[in-house]
Image: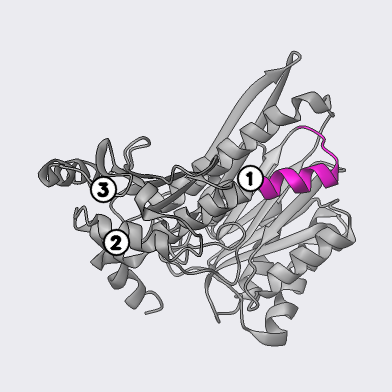
Amino acid sequence: MYSGIKAGLKDSKKKDLALIVAPQDSICSGVFTQSIVRASCVEICNQRISKSSGLIRAVLINSGQANACNGDAGMRDSLTATKALSQELGINEDQILICSTGVIGVPLPINKLLKNIPLLVKSLNHNKFVSASEAILTTDLRPKRIAIETSIEGRNITISAFAKGSGMIYPNMATMLAFLTCDVGIEKYLWDQMIKEAAQLSFNAISVDGETSTNDSFLAFNSGLKISDKYLPVIQEGINYVCQDLAKSIVRDGEGSNCLVEMIVSGVRNNSDALKIAKSIINSSLVKTAIHGCDPNWGRIVAAAGNAGVDFKLSMVDLFIGDFQILNKGNLQDYQESKIIQYMREKMNGEYLINDKIEISLNFNNGNGQAKTWGCDLSKKYIEINSEYTT
């Protein structure tokens, strides 16, 4: 069940407090920021998932305040909030998690939060998925949510998820915040592996601005009847799809961005090397600003690839922007720059179009490794948003 309400935690008066309650015996896996500067809520989540072997029942989410770097008071407020929710739900406190997002160094308005917990619980409903997805947003322009359904042996199976993120996006685990539910019972050790894979192929493969947050958390719940192990690859495919959809929604909604960029790397020794190269390119400020200016400055792309820490020969590289080939085995092709500029301009529309993207592909012709990453352009608007964020 879900809930999302206005608790007065944000000056905007928008929804700012959410709750997810999972069925009895639900299994939860979490992937968290690898930053050594971690919010107290991240520590609580990590500890409680480990202590309970993943038997988690609820997660409380507030937006507006990261409650990070607030010392003992930050931890105390987080524990106070989960204790109050525990009493209201009648659930063991160790089975309740908390996630916070917003400005670092700003504490929870704990009294307002506590006052609204009864209303939050009272509002719980299976149909409040949308409200919960809206209540976790900060600088996001749009909610990020998705639900897919399939049938296995006559049984309908649903995977649902929502996320938030727009700035401080270059995750070293997952994203700002993401929450996924699946109504299939799966053993904890298998679920851990499945969620780790999904994060690596989605939230760990995006960049808006090259910044990692103190609060990044991806929590995934499963519950219900088990299925034959032979169908687990189908469930994995569904989880990967859902997470990649959310990840791409985050970079489409990147602060000040105007387009989605998909970076495709192939022909290297292994997938790990391919991901390193793809992430190096998608995170390059020079590549991002060139894309914003619709400038097919391909030298910035190969330079960023060269900084990835992966050995390759430029004489083997094929490079495309869209369908336009620029390098063929390292040799510059006779291409019409004006056509590439026009292609980029057509994609640089600021619209939230699902399949509209600038595609850049590199083939190193030296193996079977491949990877995809996603990013966006870097604009003057990004500077404006972040120069005024706390004021």
Tell me the kind of residue under disc 2: Arg
Sequence-earlier tag: 1 or 2: 1
Q: Is residue 87 visible from the viewing direction of this image? A: no
Residue for badge 3: 331
Q: Which residues are magenta?
A: 184-198
| Picture disc at residue 300 | 2
Q: Is residue 32 visible from the viewing direction of this image? A: yes
Tell me the kind of residue under disc 1: Ala
Sequence-earlier tag: 3 or 1: 1
Tell me the kind of residue under disc 3: Asn
Contact flag, marks 1 and 2 (Cβ < 8 Å): no
Considering the whole magenta stretch, tell me its main secondary structure: helix
Pointer 3 local density, CA inside 10 Å: few below 14, some 14–19, many at least 20? some
Contact flag, marks 2 and 3 (Cβ < 8 Å): no
Q: Is residue 102 above or below residue 161?
A: below
Q: Residue 63, position in %: x, y? A: 55, 64
